[in-house]
Amino acid sequence: MGTQPGGLMEHGTNKDPFDNDELLSRCIEGDDLAWRELVARYSNLVYSAAMQTGIDTDVANDVFQQVWMELHRSLDRIDNLRAVPRWLVVTTRRIAYRNAVVASRWLHDVQEDSIEPAPGADAHLVALEQRHELEVALGKISDRCERLLRMLFYSSRKSTYQEISDDMGLMSHSVGPLRTRCLRSLRKLLESEQ
Amino acid sequence: MKWNDLLNQYQDAIDVDWAPAPSDLVDAVGQMHRDAPVPRPSDADTAHSVSPTDVRAAGTHTQPQSSFVTRNLDGIDVTVSIQRPTGEHLSVIKGRSWLNPRSEEVILVVLARHQSVMATHEVAHGEVFEFEEVLLPGWRLEFHLADGSVAIFRPES
């Protein structure tokens, strides 16, 4: 069972318990709620980055915890929340790589020179950051929109309007307008984060 | 932005293998908040450390894949050896630090790079510290003293 991609925020209200400017400072001050929000907000990004290196689940669990320990130690040094996603992915790769070396294993997806790529130079890293943005945005819109857009985005095959209306208990003619409204909300959220 | 534009822009992101973190792990990490973060050295600390007040042992003695450095930073003498076994991509940093004048206070030795505190080790005067880490250019050792001052060791300075 995964965590809510948007953290502890309330679905459909677009309200975060902390705004981006204060979340880090509250964590540094020792605010437990802020720390839990930070963990909830980025946990799936860290875990996905760990699994992407090719390590098995047990090692990924260790790496996951080590990354958060390192973030906790480093909180005072990170200038703003925007730097956190890349920091987390790069740190995850380094720790996964380190653990693999210590265990004399070889990680085909992580070389020493790929631990810290130049900004924009690593397509996997960019895609992972974008997926995080997408998941956060989906977590902020209403449950109904989230469900609809997940069916449209992530379904292994494209669902028809009829299938979507059956699944969601909607009139088939209302799927199109709902999709438009949901897309508009998602787009707004994505643009506000850029 | 139209629907297809959005799909195109985020296509790589949609194709990413996304692995939700197990909730028990997230809960455990969420309760981790115990120790205070390691404070960032002030600009003054950083400036002073870039130019060590004294460099002893004729600077750096280098052998293939290893180096040994002794320095006198402000109020603290440090000896550091850096070993990088061939082909393993993992470096071992060993060292000792001596307070000058001698004191019983504990020194927090921090292995850091850019915005990351990679590892920490608490030592008393003359005790050995050791780190085993993947080191990329730009790493440093910070010696945090009880009075809040920080001496910084940079291998390249």
Image (cartoon, rainbow, N blue to C red):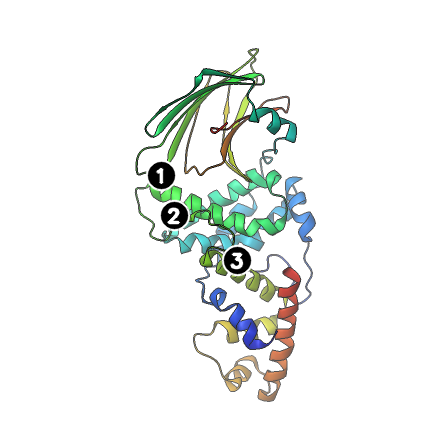
Q: Which mark is residue A59?
A: 2
Q: Quadrant of the C terminus of chain A?
A: bottom right
Q: Position of residue B44 (x, y in %)?
A: 65, 27
Chain of the residue under the numbered disc 2 shown in the image: A
Residue tagged by mark 1? B89
> Label 2 is placed on what type of residue?
Val
Within-10-Å neighbours for mark 2: few <14, some 14–19, many 20+ = some
Can you name the residue that lies furthest to the top here?
A: B101
User: Would residue B76 be found to the left or right of residue B66 on screen?
Assistant: right
Q: CA distance from mark 2 to mark 1?
A: 19 Å
Q: Position of residue A50 (x, y in %)?
A: 43, 52
Q: What kind of element bears circle 3?
A: helix
Chain of the residue under the numbered disc 3 shown in the image: A
Chain of the residue under the numbered disc 1 shown in the image: B
Tags 3 and 1 both on a single chain? no
Q: Position of residue A98 (x, y in %)?
A: 39, 41
Residue tagged by mark 3? A129
Please identify the quarter of the rendering in which residue B34 is found. top right
Compare residues B135 and B123 and report the one nearer the observer.
B135
